[in-house]
Amino acid sequence: MENRIVADGVEWCESDEIGIPIRANLSSCHPSYPDGNSSCCPPWPAQEPVDFQFPHPSSPIRVRRPVHLVDDEYKAKYERAVAIMKQLPLDHPHNFWRQADLHCLYCTGAYSQFNYSTEFRIHHSWLFFPWHRALLYFHERILGKLIGDDSFALLYWNWDHPDGMRFPAMFTEGALDDTERDSMDIQNVVDHNFHGTDRGLSDREQILENLALMYNQMVSSPKQPELFMGCKLRSGDEGKCKGTGTIESAPHNTVHRWVGSRDNPVRENMGAFYSSGFDPVFYSHHSNIDRLWALWQRMRDNELEFDDEMWLNSEFTFYDENLQFVRIRVRDVLSISKLRYGYQDIELPWLDARPKPSVPPEIARSILRKREGALQTPGGAPQGNWTLDKTLTVRIQRPRINRTREEKRREEEILFVYGIGAAGTSAGFVKFDVFVNAVEELTVLSPRSREFAGTFSHIHDSPRLYPEEGGGRDKKKVKPHLKLGISELLEDLQADEDDSIWVMLVPRGGTATVQGIRIDYMK
Ligand SMILES: [Cu+2]
C-alpha cells in the first residue's frame, strides 16, 4: 500500500510494501573519506556471504560490564586483545583498522544498495540499532578469539549513571588510547546535550541534566517504536527517509561529538561517521547504546518493534571470528540472549528523573493566553521555510484534544518537525532543541525543564565522493525530520485540553532551516 503525502510543498512516501529488503551491493564500493584520496573499501575482492548461524544455546553468555566497575586485570586483558588486533596485517579482516572501516562502509554511503544506485546508509533510520548490534557482536567475538577467551565480553561506557559519566580512564592507556580526542571536554562530566562548546555547568547540574534528558529519550518521548528506532527506511530512492530516533540523536550523536577533537574539521575521530570506529572508546560507547536498546525492549516486554518483512530481512555482512564472511539479518539480532551475550544490570537513576515544569503550568498558560493576541496566526500553524538564526516560536494547532488514556496508548501525539536543512556553512553540524509552551528565559531552559520535548542533533555524514567511473548519484534528496512523542509531556504541562501549543525551536549549533511543524498521530 502506497501513501504519497504532499504537504506544505514537501513530498515523501510512506509505503509498506515497495522495494526489497535492504542490502549492500558489495561490488559497488565507492571512496567516501572527505580527503577524496582514501577509502574504507576492503582491500580484498567482494565475496559471497554464508548465512549467519546462532551460537550454540549452551555456549557461555558473555556478560558486558560497565567500564567503571571492572578490575585492572580485566582492563589489561581488554587492552591486550585490542593491541593484538592493531598488530594484525593491514589486509586482515580482523585488523583493528579494517574493523574500524566497517563503520565508514555502512555509514558514509560507500556501498550502493543491491539493485539500486541509491546509497546504503544505516544511520537516521530503523537500521541504526540492528546494524550496530551486529557489528559489536562480531567485534567482541573476534577480540575473544585473538586472546583465546570464549567468554570475553566488551565493556559498556555507562554514561547514563552518575558514576560512569566521566570519560573512562582505561581508554587513555596503551592500545586503547586515541590522539584525536578533545582534551578539554573529556576532563568534564559528559554532556548528553552537547552543543559543541563547554557550557560551564557544575558537575551536579550536568549530572541532573543528563538524567532528565535520559528520561525524556528513553521513557517520555519514544512511546511508539519508530520514535525510538528511527524512520522506516526502505530500498531505493523511493524508500528513503531520514528520521533519527530519540537515543540516536542524543546522547548518541552528542557524545560522539563531545569526544572528538575540536581541532579537527568535523571533530574526528569520534565526531564523524568515517572516522569514529578508529577510537577504541567507540565500542564501549556503542555497547551502551546497544544496552539501552535492550533495556527499552525489556521495558516493553520484548514486543516486536516492527512486524515488517522489509525490516526483518534487511541484511548486513561481516567477517566472523572464524573468518567466515557472514550475512546477518535484522531478524537475527533482535534478542541478545539468542546471541549469547547480556549486560550486567545496574540501577537506572534516570527512571526517576521525570522533569518538572520550569513554571507552574497554570501560570504558564495564563501568560501564553495573553501572548496569543499578538502572535496568533489565523487558520492554524504558520508554515514556512524558517531559518533558525535565532529562536523561533510558533503556535501549532492540535487536531484533537482530551483524548482518552486508551486513545493515547494506541496513538501517540507527535510533534513533527520536517524538511530540516542546514544554511550556509553549517553543513557539518546543526543542532536545535525543541520546547513546548515555554515562557521562561532561554538561559534557564534545558532538558531539566518538562517543557523540553527533544533535540535535533546531527553528526557529520561524510558525503559520498564519486570517482569518474563511480556509481550514479542519488536522484532524490531527502531532508531529515524530527518526530517527538509529546502525550506525556502535554499531560505534565496540563495542556491536554488546549487546542494549540506553542513550540519553540532554539538553535544550539550551526544554522538549521526548517520547512514546517505540525502535530501528527502515530500508531
Ligand atoms: Cu555511533
Image (tube, rainbow, N blue to C red):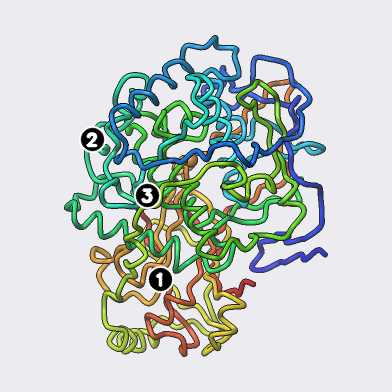
- Identify the residue under disc 2: 184
Left or right: 51 as drawn, with respect to 460: right
Label 2, label 1: how many angstroms apart (C-alpha)?
A: 34 Å
Check disc 2 and report its element: helix, strand or loop.
loop
Q: Amino acid at mark 3?
A: Gly
Q: Earlier in the sequence, mark 3 or mark 1?
A: 1
Residue 433: image quadrant is bottom left
Extreme residue in the left direction: 202
Residue at 40%, 71% in the rendered image:
393
Residue 231, image x and y in percent?
A: 62, 56
Q: SS class of the residue under badge 1?
A: strand
Point 77% across, 54% down: residue: 309
Check the picture and name the quadrant holding the C terminus. Answer: bottom right
Q: Are marks 2 and 1 in contact (CB under 8 Å)?
A: no
Q: What amino acid is labelled 1 in the image?
A: Thr
Sequence-wise first label, 3 or 2 = 2
Residue 469, position as x, y percentages in the image? 75, 21
Mark positioned earlier in the residue sequence (2 or 1):
2
Identified by mark 2, the residue type is Met
Q: How many marks?
A: 3
Q: Which of 213 and 65 lies nearest the eye of the viewer?
A: 65
Q: Disc 3 designates what residue?
A: 509
